[in-house]
């Protein structure tokens, strides 16, 4: 029995060691879905899990990009939470199809509610138009706990795909459907140099001529056979 108990203890410890590195990744603030089509509008949810056993999440602040500002941002009410949308002057005016944009939404803050131990909350936002010519938008986020602790999820994606310690929510932008599509190549067979192109129905004509020749041979053979059968 002692052998099996030791084996079970070792297995449990190994499981904890293997699983532990994966746990923090599940607790990041993320944006869902993580991909949208460039040039259009989208609705996303900022998913905020509570990471602390001794505190509750009481405030979430999301910063919106100012280098690629979004002209239209609206939020969905969350029961028990108060939302504040702040607009600010852009560092540099941006020309859009709706004219020159000098101000845009810079932050959205949800407060007054609670996310308890083992819980998460989603905060939905509709926004657009999404910029074209870039492959992602980064939304640095601050998560405040009831004890006063503030966790900043603001690290941009690292080069090479390595995950930073406190990754910011990232929205990947896919090219609009058909934006980069090119016409399918048409197979063309070139005629030999100096040769005249064959008529479109050349094959049919050749088959027809061959059929007539075969028929003529058959008729001649039949006449010859009849002549041989006549009495002299």
Image (spheres, grey):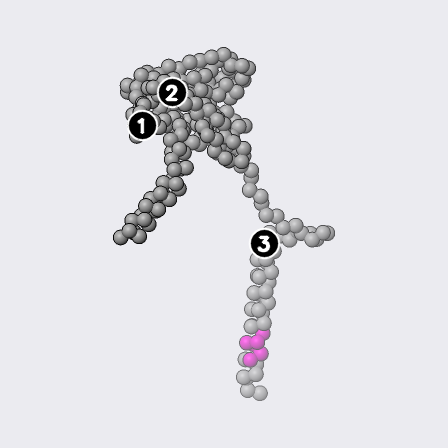
Q: How many marks?
A: 3
What mark, if any, has residue 149 been given in the picture?
Answer: 2
Q: Secondary structure at mark 1?
A: loop
The percent position of residue 68, horizontal first and vertical second, equals 51, 21
Q: Earlier in the sequence, mark 1 or mark 3?
A: 1
Q: Residue at x 54, y 33 (%)?
A: 159
Q: Residue at x 58, y 43 (%)?
A: 185
Front residue of this view, candidates 187 and 179: 179
Residue pictured at 59% horizontal, 48% vertical? 187
Who comes first in sequence, dot 1 or dot 2? 1
* Residue 151 location (% of width, % of height): 41, 23
Q: CA distance from mark 1 to mark 3?
A: 82 Å
Magenta stretch, residue numbers = 220-225
Q: Which residue is mark 3?
A: 201
Q: Secondary structure at mark 3?
A: loop
Q: Which residue lies under the disc numbered 1?
A: 53
Marks 1 and 3: which is nearer the front? Answer: 1
Is residue 45 visible in the rendered image? The answer is no
């Amino acid at each position: 029995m002692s052998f099996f108990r030791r084996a079970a203890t070792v297995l449990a410890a190994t499981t904890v060691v293997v699983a532990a590195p994966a746990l923090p990744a599940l607790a990041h603030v993320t944006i869902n879905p993580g991909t949208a089509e460039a040039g259009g509008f989208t609705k996303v949810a900022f998913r905020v899990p509570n990471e602390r056993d001794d505190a509750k999440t009481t405030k979430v602040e999301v910063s919106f990009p100012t280098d690629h500002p979004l002209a239209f941002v609206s939020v969905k009410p969350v029961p028990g939470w108060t939302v504040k949308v702040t607009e600010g002057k852009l560092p540099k005016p941006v020309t859009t199809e709706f004219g020159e944009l000098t101000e845009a939404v810079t932050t959205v803050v949800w407060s007054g509610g609670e996310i308890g131990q083992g819980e998460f909350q989603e905060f939905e936002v509709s926004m657009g138009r999404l910029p074209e010519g870039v492959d992602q938008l980064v939304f640095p986020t601050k998560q405040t706990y009831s004890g006063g602790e503030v966790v900043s999820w603001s690290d941009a994606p690292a080069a090479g795909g390595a995950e930073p310690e406190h990754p910011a929510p990232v929205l990947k932008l896919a090219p609009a459907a058909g934006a980069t599509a090119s016409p399918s190549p048409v197979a063309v067979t070139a005629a030999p140099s100096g040769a005249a192109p064959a008529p479109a129905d050349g094959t049919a004509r050749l088959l027809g001529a061959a059929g007539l020749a075969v028929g003529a041979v058959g008729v001649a053979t039949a006449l010859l056979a009849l002549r041989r059968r006549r009495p002299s």
